[in-house]
Image (tube, helix red, strand yellow):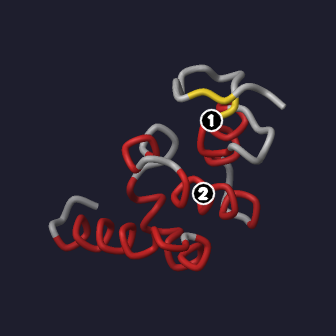
Amino acid sequence: MRPLTVDLREEHLRPYFLWDEDISVGELRKALAGTDGPERDRLLGKMLREARDTDVWTFVAPRDVKEALPRIGRRLGRRAAFWTFLIEGWTSDGLI
């Protein structure tokens, strides 16, 4: 497995929040930029559950999270309430 990194500019290393999966930062970026589908939802859900919220925006835009939240909410565990609160708040404030 590739070494873990907290420096998300290191495209060839594994992001710290995918500690159990051998996928590089670059591969994750490519998967999340692709079309919606089960694999994209799985990776997005895992990232929202495990990554620091500020690191999420390195890979996706708030609108991406808003659109996916109804599909992936069950994958977020204890972080579901946080993401729902954040996205609903930003939506009601007109930021998304």
The amino acid type, in three-letter code, at marker 1 is: Pro
Label 1 environment density (alpha carbons within 10 Å; few <14, some 14–19, many ≥20): many
Query: Looking at the rendered structure, which numbered label has been put on residue 15?
Result: 1
* Residue in the picture at 15% in, 67% down: 93
Q: Quadrant of the C terminus?
A: bottom left
Q: Residue at x 42, y 67 (%)?
A: 66
Label drawn at residue 44: 2
In the rendered structure, which amino acid carries the disc numbered 2?
Leu
Question: How far across and down, in percent of the image, does residue 85 sit?
Answer: 30, 73
Q: Residue at x 43, y 47 (%)?
A: 52
Q: Earlier in the sequence, mark 1 or mark 2?
A: 1
In the rendered image, residue 20, in percent from the top left (x then y), is placed at 75, 47
Residue found 54% across the figure and 28% down from its top: 8
Q: Which mark is residue 47?
A: none
Residue 43 in the image: x percent, y percent? 67, 55
Q: In the picture, residue 79 is in which quadrant?
A: bottom left
Q: Depth check: 1 or 12 in front?
A: 1
